[in-house]
Structures are given as C-alpha cells and as structure tokens.
C-alpha cells in the first residue's frame, strides 16, 4: 500500500492494465512525451513506447473516431480529452457510433473505449476548463458515465472502465487530482460500475453527491454532526449513468429526507433524475422536499467569482437544515 | 529572401482507361482474369437489378426510405474488388453493391430498409462496419482500424467510402490528416456522384477536384473516371498495394453520377434538369463494360439475357426470404445490444414494456 | 385565416419575418433550391434570392460557426440542421460560442440565431432520424430550447425565436409536420418563449407534455374523461428551457397529481427536471408519485419497433390511472 | 483515356524579405512610411515587455494561467497592421499583441487572466471577437462575418488568427471551405509557432507546409517568414487588398516560433530541447527589425533606451490600474449577460446567491 494522489492512482491503473493486456493503448493530445497536461499519463511512453502511448494531432473527433475503429478491431483505447469542456468535439462520434456500434452491428462489434477527461471547477482555470456537464453523457443511451472521488476509487473504477466492453466516459475531478493522498493497494482492485457507494451510515437525512463535491459534502456532514447533532447518511454516486438506485431508495425510505449536491448547472442536471427516481420508489416515505445544492444555470464565471458558483460547505449545511426543519 | 513557389511532394492525377463507348486504352488496361471480369459484370448487373427492385418495393410500401445506387456500380465495385477477405471496410449508406460484393446478404437490405434492426447484423467473418448514415463520420473508423492493423503488424488494409458531400465535413479532413500522420494503410474512396441531395459539386467546394484535397494532408490523390471499372480498379489496386506494403494512405475520387434519386423521399426535379441526367446515362458504367467484354468475346447478347433471368430469380428468392422474416417483430428485443450486460435501470424499463405488451394482448383478447 | 399544416405555418413565419427585416437570412443544407427536405423553406429562395436563402456545403459546424459570425455582425440567421440527430455536429460551437458570446464580450456582441431542426419519431424514418434529445440543449446555459406542438403555436413561436436576441434551438416535431391543419391568422402573431400554456382545464390530475406527444396526451385525456370521468388539466410546455414553472406548480397544487409525457429517453430526461421543480414548490400538495411516460434509455429502434418505443395513448392512460389509484 | 497530372489553379508560395541579420531584399521591400515603421517597432517592443511582465505577475501569483507570445510579435503585428479600424478580427488566445494594436486596453489582459470576466469586455468601436480558447473554432466566425459583409456590400474584411495545431481541427477546413465557396473576404493567418503544447509541427500533419492546405479549398496559400515583419505585412496586405476588392480569401502561414512556454502551466523541458530554442532566439523578430530601422537611420541605441523606459512606465501604470479594479468582485454579476432578459428560473437562482451572501455577511459579523 502506498499513499497516492488521484493523478498517481490513475497512472497506476493504466500502467498495470497496459502491462497485463496489450490491447490497451492510450491516445490523445500531449499524452505521450509530455505525459498529459496534468501528468496523468506521465512516463507511460517510457515503458510502453509510442506505439501504445500515442500523441495525436489536435483533433478530438479524430481521436475518438480512430479510437472507435481501433476498439472495433479489438484494441481497448483510452482516450484523453484534455478538458471535458472540449469533449463536445467528440459528441457526434460518441453518439452516432461509440454508443451504437454494438446495437447497429447486432452484437458483432463493440466499442470498449474509455474517454478520460479532467472536469469540474475550483482550480482557478481559464474559460472552458471548469464546467461539469456530465448530463450530456448520462442522457446518451449506450454510454456509461463515471466520476470518481478519491485516489482509491479512481484507480479501481478506471481499471473497471478499461475492462468494460462498452464505452465509458470517465470524468476526473481536477480539483481532486492532488488535493489529498490515500492508501492505494499495490495489487489490482476493481469496482463495479453502476453502483453508488454508501460512505457514511446515518439516520436523519440522506445526502447524495459525487466527484469533487464529496469532500465538501463530508465536511458539511461532520460539521452538522458536531453543531446540530445531525446524523447523515452519505452516498457517493460514482457512476452517474446508468446507476442502480436500490440502495439510495432504501436509505431515503429510512431517513425520509434527501439532499443532492453537484457542481453541474441545476436545471436538467443529475439531481433531477435522482429526485425523479426517489419519487418513483420512495415518495411515501418522504417527509420533506428533496433539496438540490448545485451550480447555477449560467456560464461558469472566471475564477474571481468561482467560489460563489461552487456549492460549498455552507450551502450544503443550509440545505440539510432546511430539509430537517420540516 | 525570395518569393518562390514551394515544390510539393505529391501531385493530383487523373485516370481513365475504358471510355463511354467501350474503347480501351491498351497501355493502361489492367490484366484481369476472364473469371474476375465476368464476376464483376455479373455483380454490376445484379446490383442494378436489385436496386430497381428495392425502389419498387419502396414504391409499393413494402419497405421504407432507401437510397438507390444506380450509376455508381463501377465506382463501388472497382474499388472493393481489390480487397482481400481479411481487409476491412467502412461505408456510408450508398454502397449497397460494395457491401454485397463483400458478402452482406441481399435480404438484409430489405430487412434493414424495411425497419428491422436485424438487417444491419454484421455476419461473423465479414470485416465491414454497418452503414453509417451520419455523413462523413465513417472514414475516421477506417483510419483507426488501419492504425490498429499497423500496431498488430497485420498485413491488412482498410477501405472507406464516402460521397462528394462528405468531403465538406471536418471529420473527412481529420481522417485524412490522421491517416497521413500515422501512415495508416487506408484507401479513401470518394464517390463523387456530383450531388449531395440538391447541392451540386460546384457548390460543395471551390476546389477544382476533390482528389486535390489529399495535398492538404501529405498523401497522393487521384481522380478517376468512376464509370470506368478498369480505371477504378487500377487506381484502387495501386493504392491497396501501396498501403499493404507500408506506403501509407491514398485518396481516390471516383468521378461518377447518381442517376436516380437521393433517396426515395427525394424529388430531384426540384433541383436538377433532365438533360444532365441524359448526358450521364450515355456514360453508363455497365453498358460500356458490356461492350468491352463483348469485344473480348467474353459476353454475348444471349449470355446477358440468360444472366438477367438468373438474377431476376435470385432477387425474387431474396425478397421472399426477407419478407418472411419481416413479420411480427418482438419489440422487447429493442433492449438488446445496448450494453453487454443490461443495467438494472434498463431492466426495469424492459419489464415495463413486457407488462404493457401483455396488458395490450389481454385487452385485445377481451375486446 | 387559413387552415395550414405546421410546415406551411413555419414557412409563413419565416416569409413574413424576412419581408419585414432584411437581417433575417436562412442557411443550411438543401434549404434554398430544394426548399428543405421537408419543404419548410419551400420557395423562399424565389422571393428572397440566394443571398438570403443560402444552400451551404455539407458541414454543420460550418453552418453554425459562420452563422455565429453573421449574428454578431448584425444579421439574424435561421439555420436548418437537416435532422436533430445531426445537431451534435454543431454542439461544440453552440456551447463554446453561441451560448457564451454575449457573456464573453460583456454584452457587446450577442448571437440572435435560430437553429431549426426536425426532431422526434413516429415517421418510419432511418437511423438518427427519430431521436429526441432536447436535454442536451436544455441543460446548456445561454441557450433557449423551444418545441411547438401545432401549426399555430409553431408559427408564433418561430417568429418570437427569430426576434429573440439570444440563440434559440427550435425543434420541430416532424410527426406533426403534416399531421393536421389549424387556423393560422394571416396577421403576425407571437408567443412568449419560456411560458408553458394551459391547454385544458381540469381538476383531477395535471398532465405536462409537449411536441408530438401533445396530440397523444390530449387523446388519452379525452378517452379518460369518457371512460373514467377523469378531468385532467393539461399543459403544453412549448419551451423546454428556460421554462417558468409557476402555472404548473399552481396546477399541481390544485390537482395533487401529475403525469409527464415525452418521447425523450427517460433517465436524465426533461421529465426529471419538471419533477424536481414540482417537488420544490408543490411537494406538500402531492397525493401520489409523479408519473413519467417516456421513451426508453436505448438506441431508438428502426421503425418496425418504434411503436413500442413511443409513448402512446394506452401508456398515458395507464399512468394517469396509476396516479389516481392512490 | 489518359493518365495525367491535373493542373491546379493555385500554387503554394514562400516569402521572406528581411533576413535574420537584418538584410533586406530591396526588390521585395514594401514601402512603408517611417511613421508606420516606428509605430510597429514600438508596438513590438511594448508587446515583448508586457509579455514579460505578465509572466512575472503570474509567477508572483497576481494573475492566473497566461499564454506568452514571445517570438511571435512580427507574426501578429505584420498581419493586423494591414487592417482598417472598421475591419473585423477573430483570434485564438495567443494574439495579445494583435489585440492591443487593434485597441484592446492592456489592463484588460491583467483583469482577464486575473480571473475577472470584465477583462474580456469588447469596447464599442472595436470590431474584434474576444479570445477563443476552443482551438480552431474562431475561424468560422470570421468567415460568417465576411459573408455578412458581402451580403451588406460593406467594403470590409475579416482577419482570423490560429495556430499550427488548429489546422488539424475539422473546423479549420470547414472554415476554409465555406470561405472558398462563398468567396468571403477573409484572411486566414496561421501562427505556425512549431508547437501545439508538446506536439511538434511534424507530428501535426504529414503535409510539407500548412500553407498548402489552401489547395484543398481552392484558394491561394502562402508561407512567410513569420519573424520578418516586412514579409508578413506584404503577404497580408496583398491578401487584404484582394479580399477587399472581391478576390476572395487567402491562407497565410507565418512560420515562427514560440520562444516561451505554452502557458504558465506548461513545462517545455519535458518535450523540447534548449538548442532548438537557441536557434530560434537568433532569428528574433525584434532585433532584426531594429537592425533594419538602424540601417534606415530611423533608430539609435539611445532611442531604443528611451523607448524602453517609456514602455516600462506605461506598463507599470497599466498594472496599477488593473490591480485597483481587481478587488472584491460582486459575485452576483455572474448572472449578467447570460440572456438579454433574465428568465424567472435564473432570477430565483440569483436571489439564492444574494441570500447566501447576506447570510454569510451576517455570520461574519456575528462570528
Ligand atoms: C452529418 C449529416 N448531415 C446531414 C445528413 C443528411 N444527409 C443525408 S445524405 C446527405 C447528402 C450526402 O451527400 P454525399 O456525401 O455526396 O453522398 P451521396 O448521397 O451523394 O451518396 C445529407 C445532407 C446526414 N445524414 N448526416
Ligand atoms: C478544442 C480544444 N482542444 C484542446 C485544447 C487544449 N489546448 C489549448 S492550446 C492547445 C495547443 C494549441 O496549439 P496551436 O494551435 O499551435 O496554438 P499555440 O498554442 O501554439 O499558439 C491545446 C491542445 C483546447 N483549448 N481546445
Ligand atoms: Mg454525392
Ligand atoms: Mg502552435
């Protein structure tokens, strides 16, 4: 076991999978010689050579389009899109082909690729470098959308994503890239895609979050326990889509209250679907409206104002208090 | 400190071998076996008749929207005829004949255009992607396949088909650029049939030819008479051989014509005049090839008549076969092939459909 | 007043606006000489010439990218994307520029363009020609997403969209293009974007729908009135985003029950946001879980199976009965 | 029925006028007024110093990530110097000097890279788009602007800047293709600074030059020594004049070098060697221009020294001005400029932020 940052853990996941399976290759802008602008693919070219760690021309559609061909041919490409804000350049290929080739060929071909992209705010970045638009992928049939929240689950989920026979969009919360270290076992560890994890037992309220909002949520929960004696149950969604809502439903049936926290814009955001599912299965157990703590329906502001955009501990606490007040 | 012209390593060429009257340029004539020549002829004829039958089926409401290939038989066949079985292919949606040559069962087209997803099954052993309706998107797949072949050191090539309209999409250029940079074994076959629905070639780009677009990406480009199967074959063979031996990609523009409709939903009288069509009918790829084969004493009028009959029977069998399969599709199958394993949320939705269906059945029985 | 199909009404809207305002131009694939593959722009080139009705090369990103430049320069381009299934080719330009130029230039430039695209299923079409993915646009800040449901509101909303100083994505339910005729007044008529319309008064349940699901919904409602004596209140959303939920909230506060009907895939679909809003404002009035009648999270099947995919009268009735059963 | 080379109407040219030592090709030398020459020199020098200062501010944590322009001064300035005030421009993100020449206040760069959206305000009267960080996306806007100018019969042109990396994006080709088809008055200025972050030009495309990509779209393309302001100016002037008089678009590749970092977040030692940088430092666009001006007796060492001082003062003023404005931004303003009119759902969110802020203030006062 070693203490690792998320960047190191992701690097380890790829390194180990590439060692084991020569179908796995990496491609993207600046992923090889430079090791990625966040160094997530650092030094992999040294070990695996430029045949397997491929610096591409600056063309995202080119990257995913060729990766689709490779994947159908039998490789397992991991593509890096330099920032999720530029992932829209791949959208037509993802929607028309990656997500459909299995269906269109009636199972003859499938597209085992992973689209890795740093996403989310809070790092004083330039325009287009802070958005959270996982919904575009979550609403697209045939695509899995995964977002880890720490070094250990990032490593395990990335391995699962690489092995997944279907396309996985894997958003990496860049605010967590080096925010903290965690023990990551040397031996391989996988994690099932599609299953939210309960990360804290509690009885008063259910809080559901993911990505860089997990530490914020957990901090708020600790403070609330301290100050208000609120015992919150917390879920880390991990997979945005398709997700299994069984455990969340059970939790809300127990607590009767729920708060959802995400960076993405509020309207038509991930929280809406979670609410819809909770209403479906747990309506009669609810004692208060479900609260959303989210980003706003605006262009993400440059960093002088990003703190006001991002959900913070205060906003989470407020929402929990509000749902408990009734 | 001069002002000077830059010498480029590649040029744009033009190739024609068999003219519209059936005259052949003996110097350029490829040496194809009689067997292959006759096989090509049969395929072209069968492709033409199948196309006509499909149009018919659509007009009778037995299938849905369908894009005819009439006029582009040589342009497709000359290219795919140069491939080995193990090679790969990605196509747009107007390469019916290329797909048939490669082994796609004729009945699957009827199924597919009849609204049955089953029709796009890619049989084991056939290394071709299903059709790609999103214009310009499939060339990149061939490049990726080519890159994978290179990585695996497999001696295969990938061929990709697309129209004149597709050359305006950014993805076309990204595909050529990647192919150039990675020297992928890919043959880009542009079916320049002069129209992208109602947009004539001249409005699609200010470039004189589509072949010259290769220059932007550091690869050879050649324009060939697409109604001349010998020219298409020759250019494609050269490109396939080059690709297979590590020489990288080639762009081939087949200069041809869409003699029929864009699709059965289209009305070309809105945008083009009959005279142009007439002019191109005189350049028909099949009739000139028949003259050529007659001159070679490989074909007679009686031979053609017999062939026509054979083909008619074959097509009828195919139609019957397809229509038998087109009864009562099980809707629940629409949940198949979305993921390798069905996630629980989707399972719930599938159960909902099953429930609705049995409810509907019950009501139908009651009512 | 003349009885018109939706195609004719849309054509009229453009023709009248172009007559009035020489900033309005049309561009797209096959929109000029051919008059559009659905003939929505038929004959406009005859009246306005090829300078204002522009057949473009086959390149959607090219179409919106140039339109953004034109719009900032002072024109009001109406782009046609031939099918909404190909609108993903414009997504990066829409997200990075059309939706942001006002913000990025601090109000100096704005982008008054309309993206028209036929959308939705039920017309026995080819692959990519039947999808409903309005969510991608609805979740994008700075973009308005409008879907009419009949000739008259189509005409009025399109005029409003053309005059709107901000980018509007205007999805036209192709199943309704020629499904029925309606009186459309000769004189200009506009309709406020962002405001759902109550199309039927009722007291037992609130049904919210839009686009080609409106006729289905209304038919179900009539049948339910007849067979079950259910008196449903029905809303036509018309604007998917941003929408004002005031009237809907009031209605649900009155009826205590709600059903939402749309073609789009269920998960992370439009209904989820409507549910989230209803929970926010009307939770305490709800007497039953809110029901969703929607498309499924799958690749839209070819037409032999599309009836099973599409919400129909039976499914709407079932959902209403379910919500009333408790 | 021949095989032959196709004659293309356009060729790819190369142009250089002022070499790295400051020698000028008298035949090609443009006749610019002394005033303009000195103005250009001042701008280049000021651009260099401002760039250095920005790097400094970033290193001190006073602004965020910033992309230096060092080495590309001639390449930007030679091009924009040919524009009229009424012309339009769309840029990528490394055209700081081009934007300053066009009238963007220096302090706004500090604001912008300091995280203040206010910094990207486009002042009235300046017809330039704000920077475009999405690589390759802004060229299409210039084409649309050019099409609108043509529609309005305005005698203006649009100039657009982008990097070598951007030429790999599909949008680059769609832009050139539209410009060609509609003969839009657009000048495409490629800043080929040899690197796209860590990707060298040779890995970006297999084409010998970027200028030749014009051939794919039926327009002239020219590669110029981008560190030679006279060559850049000459090529741009020719293109601007042609565009203004209805002659359509031109692609100009400025062959230059990014002497500094990609951005302040970048570490070029990971991917390029110092020797290459040294080689290019010897080709500096400013020093050779200073030799040229000295040879013309327009500039002395003392003159340069005085200018340097003037510029230093000016930049200090700008920094002070900017930093004064960078205090306590009102977060609520982030809801501005999303739509012309704020929709009710957004108003609710804005009110939520206002409420949170006043809560926070209250707590701060209490706590
Ligand atoms: C990305 C995309 N845009 C638009 C369409 C609608 N469309 C289908 S075919 C076609 C024209 C294609 O022209 P071309 O590439 O020349 O092929 P052809 O039809 O002539 O075989 C268009 C515009 C589409 N299918 N995909
Ligand atoms: C669409 C898109 N993809 C990726 C990036 C990340 N990125 C920013 S600059 C850059 C390299 C740009 O290279 P070039 O066009 O040569 O311009 P230069 O930086 O050299 O000025 C990359 C990959 C981006 N901003 N936009
Ligand atoms: Mg065509
Ligand atoms: Mg560069």
Image: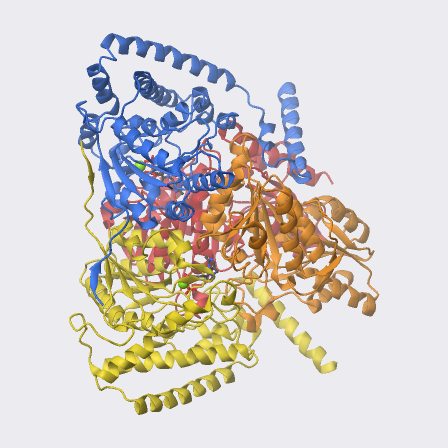
Chain colours: A red, B yellow, C orange, D blue
Compared to residue C30, the image places residue D259 above or below, namely above
Compared to residue A84, the image places residue B350 above or below, namely below
- D325 on left or right of D218: right
Give the quadrant of the C terminus of chain C. Answer: bottom right
Residue D271 at x, y percent in the picture: 25, 37
Compared to residue A205, the image places residue C175 above or below, namely below
The residue most toward the front is B275
- B182 on left or right of C15: left
Residue C82 at x, y percent in the picture: 52, 57
- B128 on left or right of D21: right
Counting the numbered discs, the total is: 0
Residue C252 at x, y percent in the picture: 77, 51
Give the quadrant of the N terminus of chain C. Answer: bottom right
A125 or B260, nearer to the observer: B260
Residue A203 appears in view: no
- Dividing the picture into quadrants, the one containing residue B293 is bottom left
Compared to residue D119, the image places residue B56 above or below, namely below
B162 or A183, nearer to the observer: B162
Residue A152 appears in view: yes
Residue C91 at x, y percent in the picture: 49, 48
> Quadrant for ligand 4?
top left
- Dividing the picture into quadrants, the one containing residue B310 is bottom left
D31 or C17, nearer to the observer: D31
A186 or B276, nearer to the observer: B276
């Amino acid at each position: 076991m070693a203490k690792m940052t998320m960047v190191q853990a992701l690097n380890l996941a790829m390194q180990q999978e590439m060692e084991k399976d020569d179908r796995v290759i990496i491609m993207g802008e600046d992923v090889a010689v430079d090791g990625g602008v966040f160094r997530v693919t650092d030094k992999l070219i040294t070990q695996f050579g430029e045949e397997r760690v491929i610096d591409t021309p600056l063309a995202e559609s080119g990257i995913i389009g060729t990766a689709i061909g490779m994947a159908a041919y039998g490789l397992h490409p991991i593509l890096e899109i330099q920032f999720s804000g530029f992932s829209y350049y791949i959208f037509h290929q993802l929607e028309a082909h990656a997500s459909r080739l299995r269906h269109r060929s009636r199972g003859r071909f499938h597209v085992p690729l992973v689209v890795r992209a740093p996403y989310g705010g809070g790092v004083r970045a330039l325009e287009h470098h802070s958005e959270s638009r996982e919904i575009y992928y979550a609403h697209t049939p045939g695509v899995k959308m995964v977002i880890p929240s720490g070094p250990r689950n990032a490593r395990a989920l990335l391995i699962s994503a690489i092995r997944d026979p279907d396309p996985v969009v894997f958003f990496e919360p860049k605010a967590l890239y080096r925010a903290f270290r965690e023990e990551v076992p040397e031996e391989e560890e996988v994690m099932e895609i599609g299953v939210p994890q309960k990360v804290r037992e509690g009885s008063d309220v259910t809080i559901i979050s993911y990505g860089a909002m997990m530490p914020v949520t957990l901090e708020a929960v600790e403070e609330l326990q301290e100050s208000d004696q609120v015992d919150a149950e917390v879920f880390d969604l991990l997979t945005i889509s398709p997700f299994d809502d069984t455990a969340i439903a059970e939790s809300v049936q127990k607590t009767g209250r729920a708060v959802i926290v995400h960076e993405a814009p509020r309207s038509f955001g991930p929280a809406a679907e979670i609410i819809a599912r909770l209403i479906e299965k747990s309506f009669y157990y609810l004692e208060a409206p479900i609260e959303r703590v989210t980003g706003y329906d605006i262009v993400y502001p440059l960093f002088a104002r990003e703190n006001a955009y991002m959900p913070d501990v205060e906003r989470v606490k407020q929402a929990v208090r509000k749902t408990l007040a009734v | 400190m001069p002002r000077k012209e830059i010498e480029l390593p590649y040029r744009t060429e033009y190739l024609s071998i068999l003219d519209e009257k059936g005259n052949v340029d003996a110097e350029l004539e490829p040496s194809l076996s009689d067997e292959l020549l006759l096989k090509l002829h049969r395929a072209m004829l069968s492709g033409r008749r199948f196309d006509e039958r499909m149009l018919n089926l659509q007009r009778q409401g037995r299938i849905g929207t369908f894009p005819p290939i009439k006029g582009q038989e040589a342009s497709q066949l000359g290219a795919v005829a140069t491939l080995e079985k193990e090679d790969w292919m990605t196509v747009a949606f107007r390469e019916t004949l290329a797909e048939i040559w490669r082994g796609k069962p004729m009945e699957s087209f009827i199924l597919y255009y009849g609204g049955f997803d089953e029709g796009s099954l890619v049989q084991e052993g056939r290394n071709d992607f299903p059709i790609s309706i999103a214009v310009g998107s499939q060339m990149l797949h061939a490049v990726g396949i080519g890159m994978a072949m290179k990585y695996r050191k497999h001696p295969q090539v990938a061929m990709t088909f697309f129209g004149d309209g597709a050359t305006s999409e950014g993805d076309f250029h990204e595909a050529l650029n990647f192919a150039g940079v990675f020297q992928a074994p890919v043959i880009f076959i542009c079916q320049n049939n002069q129209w992208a629905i109602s947009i004539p070639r001249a409005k699609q780009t200010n470039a004189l030819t589509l072949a010259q677009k290769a220059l932007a990406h550091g690869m050879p480009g050649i324009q060939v008479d697409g109604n001349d199967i010998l020219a298409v074959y020759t250019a494609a063979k050269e490109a396939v051989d080059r690709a297979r031996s590590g020489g990288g990609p080639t762009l081939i523009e087949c200069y041809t014509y869409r003699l029929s409709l864009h699709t059965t939903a289209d009305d070309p009288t809105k945008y083009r005049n009959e005279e142009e069509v007439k002019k191109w009918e005189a350049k028909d790829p099949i009739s000139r090839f028949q003259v050529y084969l007659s001159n070679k004493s490989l074909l007679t009028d009686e031979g053609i008549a017999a062939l026509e009959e054979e083909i008619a029977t074959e097509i009828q069998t195919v139609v019957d076969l397809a229509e038998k399969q087109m009864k009562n599709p099980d809707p629940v199958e629409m949940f198949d092939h979305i993921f390798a394993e069905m996630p629980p949320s989707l399972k719930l939705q599938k159960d909902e459909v099953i429930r609705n269906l049995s409810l509907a059945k019950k009501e139908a029985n009651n009512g």
